Image (tube, rainbow, N blue to C red):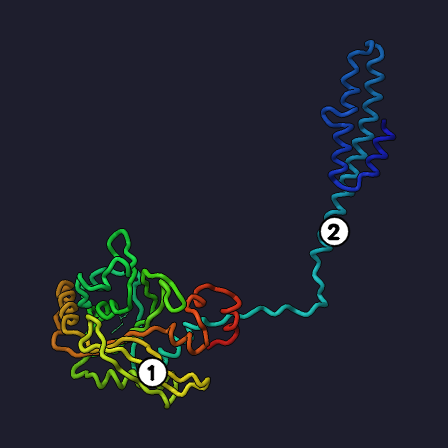
Amino acid sequence: MQQEALQEITAADTLEALQAVKTKYVGKKGLITQQLGGLGQLPPEERKARGAEINVVRQAIQAALDEKEGTLKRAALDAKLRSEAVDVTLPGLGLPSGGLHPITRVYDDLIGIYRQMGYAVVEGPEVEEEHYNFEALNVPWYHPARDLQDTFWLEDGRLLRTHTSPMQIRYMVDHEPPLKIVVRGKVYRYEATDATHESMFHQLEGLVVGEGISMADLKGTIAEMARGLYGPSAKVRFQPSYYPFVEPGADFAVYWDNPRGESKWLELGGCGMVHPNVFKAVDDLREQAGKDRIYEGMTGFAFGLGPERIAMLKYGIPDIRYFYANDPKVMGQFRGELG
Ligand code: PHE
């Protein structure tokens, strides 16, 4: 039995095979264990000699098992280390660089233009109070924009802002005129998505308040932005439109000599002169906070636009959903170029 066992141990070339041999001979129901169990049937005078004999065999097998186990484990470790070894003669691996998201780039362009015109850049909360998103902006309860369909409501009565305009209110409550700000940030609308609609998108909001601000200032500002984005050939067009928080209100579009020969009017956003009810709502909030009423009688203009539209055209991105799908085949094209 000892000879057979030693042969099987020599032949075992994996730890699993060795374990099987171990079980066969010295396991709980192994051959050696069975032999020891049989001692009881021998006459007492034979037991001692027979027991000693079996033990010698058991020790020989156990020693061979231990030695082979050590050999196999060392071999396994060697193989692992070899496979993980570093070939120091190989050239280094370049780290792939990241890049700025197309929306970030468009924001950078826009904000650069407005900084040059002396605007402060601010941000505000995406979870907003109903009062700031609607009431204070002269959006009455019966206005269609208040429809449950368009707004993501939170259980506590707050909402995800549907535009960046509530920051007009927040900023005026905290600051005194004259002021010039642009607000950047995400907005949310509860609507079906398609190539030009997403439930989350971005806006750039502008607000200028002071004495004697006119529609001419608004038009000049939008024209300056258009030239900053598209060069001296850029033209702007204003069409009457309705937003409850401005009067008069307009939509504006930009036209320029597009090098790809795709010149057409690009509808960019809405704008208008700040509605007196907005100034009144700001003064009401200021009064509640123990501040002076200083906005009634002021003049100002506001505008809001979507960087997605600019980015889609600038980078030839056909579907707004690509911006947020994080597909490396799309976003990978913006790698490395920082701006
Ligand atoms: N808040 C408007 C919107 O989201 C855009 C806008 C801003 C219009 C400022 C006029 C003045 O559609």
- Label 1, on which residue? 254
Q: Which mark is drawn over residue 79?
A: 2
Secondary element type, mark 2: helix
- Quarter of the image holding residue 56? top right
Closer to us: mark 1 or mark 2? 1
Respond yes or no on whether mark 2 lies under 8 Å from ligand 1.
no
- Quarter of the image holding residue 22? top right
**Image quarter (top left, top right, bottom left or bottom right) of the N terminus:** top right
Where does residue 126 sit, x and y in percent of width and height? 31, 62
Q: Is residue 179 visible?
A: no
Where does residue 312 sit, x and y in percent of width and height? 42, 74
Q: Dot 2: few (<14), some (14–19), or many (≥20) neighbours within 10 Å? A: few
- Quarter of the image holding residue 117? bottom left
Amino acid bearing label 1: Val
Where does residue 124 sit, x and y in percent of width and height? 30, 66
Where does residue 164 sit, x and y in percent of width and height? 28, 68
Closer to us: 250 or 19: 250
Q: CA distance from mark 1 to mark 2?
A: 67 Å
Q: Quadrant location of ligand 1?
A: bottom left
Amino acid bearing label 2: Ala
Please count the marks in the image: 2
Secondary element type, mark 1: strand
Q: Residue at x 75, y 33 (%)?
A: 20
Closer to us: 295 or 87: 295
Q: Residue at x 83, y 34 (%)?
A: 8
Q: Residue at x 33, y 71 (%)?
A: 203
303 lies left or right of 23? left
Closer to us: 176 or 165: 165
